[in-house]
Amino acid sequence: MIRSDKRFLKNIDRVRLFDLKNYLYRKGWKQSANNGQKWQIFKFDVDSTNSLDLILPSNESFIDFRERIQQSIEALSQIEDKSVSELLAELMVENADSVKLRLKVPKSVNSLPIEDASRHIKAIKNLFLYSGCSEIKNFPHFEQPLPAAQEFLSDFEFCHTFRGSFGFEVSSTIIKEKEDRDLFEIPSNRRIVERIARGLSALDQAVRSDDPDILISSYETALNARMCDALTQIGLGGQINFAVDIDWANILEPSEDVLFFHGLTIGEAQVSILNYASEKLKVVEPTMQEISGRVVNLHCVANPSEGGARRSVAIKVDHSEHGLIEVRLALGPDAYLQAIKAHTEGRELVASGQLQRKGNTWSLDAITSVREGLESNK
């Protein structure tokens, strides 16, 4: 009986009435009658003379709603000659994309260090967050997540971990009941998952061809640098292999280029490509620019007026293209004193030179001028 199946009871909460009705419509059932506030009848014509009726509650407000849904699923499993678990698995992806990440740990391991678990979860969050960033702007790298991308995360939720090994499941509903949107527009949460799938496909091709440029050149539609970082961090930098599997919602077919993608295992070869691609995507070739920002760090271990002293300054720059970045400058004695004065007086420092980024580090080289700017209000 269904009531004795704890796994079923655990997952039944993920089946909404809206999803069950969509499943019935897709399978050829038609709504034939309803009693307004209490119930609704769906009919399936077996042949010209025989039909089947299925009674569903009219809404989810009734105390016995879950019990009624269980009974309906049990009846459907008999009608379709499927096990309850098979039918439930279909219903859970009727209207929701499911991204499953399974850690490949030895069978003897029965727990995870809590610090490692938080690192896995943070990396998974970043994978979706920075995928959302690329849906807003096609940048190869993001210093910080875009504020608008944070809003996309509300469309995703962690589900119960699944049986076997250690795993995480992230689910996102495709169509919300009574949602007012353009039905011809792909929802943002589906585009985010498709970008992840597209990136994993490109990663697989890059590994098979031993050509990381396949992954690097596809950043506009696939993985940006932060997404590469997130994938490596899910496996704790290569310490743990893990599998990523995607079940697409039945209600909306995915884009053609990811239609047949279902999963990939991330191991040593994949992490190596991801690390390389991330570094390359973070590189910004030197260009002559004038930057300005508040001084956030001054460092000189010797007398700054001495010619051989190493004088470094960091300024926080709100760059029109790269966002909020911290840029390092190596300065001569006079320019360093100007930086100290600007910092003391709360003014910005303005400098011209070759701005570039290597990895996560921004620097201004070949500096041609340094001066005090406007009073900083930050």
Image: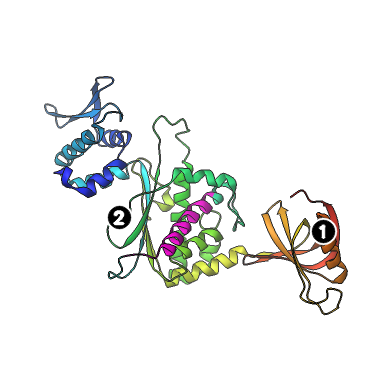
Kindly identify which residue carries mark 1: 344
What's the magenta bit mostly, secondary-structure-wise?
Answer: helix
Classify mark 1: helix, strand or loop.
Answer: helix
Q: Position of residue 117 (x, y in %)?
A: 41, 61
Q: Which mark is residue 169?
A: none
Q: Which mark is residue 162?
A: 2
Classify mark 2: helix, strand or loop.
Answer: loop
Residue 313: quarter of image: bottom right
Q: Position of residue 13 (x, y in %)?
A: 29, 41
Left or right, 185 with respect to 169, comes to right
Q: Position of residue 143 (x, y in %)?
A: 62, 57
**Residue at figure coordinates x 68%, y 58% from the top left:** 325
Q: Which residues are magenta?
A: 111-132
Question: Gap between marks 2 and 1, in whole Å?
Answer: 57 Å
Q: How is the image coloured?
A: rainbow
- Specify whether residue 262 is in view: no
Q: Position of residue 69 (x, y in %)?
A: 23, 35
Give the total number of marks visible in the rendering.
2
Identify residue type, mark 1: Thr
Q: Is residue 96 above or below residue 195?
A: above
Residue 24: quarter of image: top left
Outermost residue to the bottom:
308
